[in-house]
Image (tube, grey):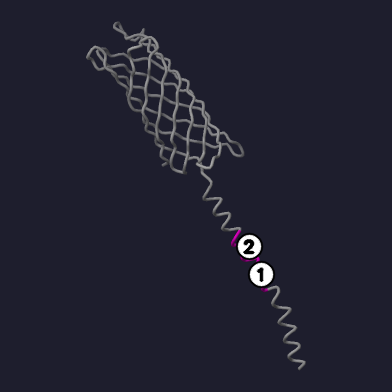
Amino acid sequence: MKFLLVFMFASLSILPPAFGQNEMEDDDMSMSEMDMDVTEAMIDVPANEIQAAYESLAPVDHDDYLYRGVNIGYQNNTTFEDTRAVMIMGPNLSYLSDEYNDAKEEMFFLKWNHGVAFNYETTAGLVQPLVAAGLGYAWYNGARDENAPMAEALLGVNFVPSNRINIYAKGGYRFLDLDDAGANSVGDLRGSTFTFGLGVSI
């Protein structure tokens, strides 16, 4: 009888900690699963991405001109710790063309763009308003062969629905003056520019 009482007392003293330990393990697993869910739900800004886009340029002094084409480039994104700010920078190349008086006119731009974006989380992904500036060089090669430095100022927005994708749109103003580039210069081609494209992380 004494042995039975001792056994029952020992069992009762052992069982509660065991149950408590199982509950703690379950809680730890739940917290771990929650952490995993949160981690999976968070979207990181792609650190490096290749971009391809549609681009247009509408010179203000030539109402009948609308140069359109493609832009390809590389962009590096550096997030500032404990802030919403992201520094964006990288080179890009544009090829634009238009037809005027049955002649195809082509323009090439090689640029370096540098700016800053700000992260805002939504249920669909990150939204990043941005401001940027670009410096580079332009080549005009239609009936004439001309080139000149250029600059641009841009406002835009990035939409980042996943860790690998960036959908973006940018609009702004490009400064390009070919008046001094050659005897038969096409003239001042400054005007509004627009870009719509896709970036893929690498």
Tally of marks: 2
Residue 96 screen position, x and y as percent: 32, 22
Q: Is residue 38 above or below residue 136?
A: below
The chief SS type of the magenta part is helix
Question: In the image, 166: left or right of 10?
Answer: left
Secondary structure under the numbered disc 2 in the rendered image: helix
Q: Is residue 119 magenta?
A: no
Q: Is residue 31 above or below residue 68?
A: below
Toward which corner of the image does residue 33 lie, by quadrant? bottom right
Residue 26 screen position, x and y as percent: 61, 65
Span colored in magenta: 18-30
Q: Earlier in the sequence, mark 2 or mark 1?
A: 1
Residue farthest toward the top in the current orientation of the protein: 183
Residue in the picture at 43% in, 15% down:
175
Residue farthest toward the front in the current orientation of the protein: 123
Q: Find residue 27 and name its label.
A: 2
Q: Nearer the viewer, residue 88 or 191?
A: 191
Dot 1 crowding, Cα within 10 Å, few <14, some 14–19, many 20+: few
Residue bearing the label numbered 1: 21
Question: In the image, 174: left or right of 139?
Answer: right
Quadrant in which the N terminus is drawn: bottom right
Q: Nearer the viewer, residue 186 or 56?
A: 56
Q: Nearer the viewer, residue 170 or 76?
A: 170
Q: Amino acid at mark 2?
A: Asp
Residue 48 screen position, x and y as percent: 45, 38
Quadrant in which the C terminus is drawn: top left
Q: Amino acid at mark 1?
A: Gln
Q: Is residue 145 above or below residue 16?
A: above
User: CA separation, marks 2 and 1?
Assistant: 10 Å
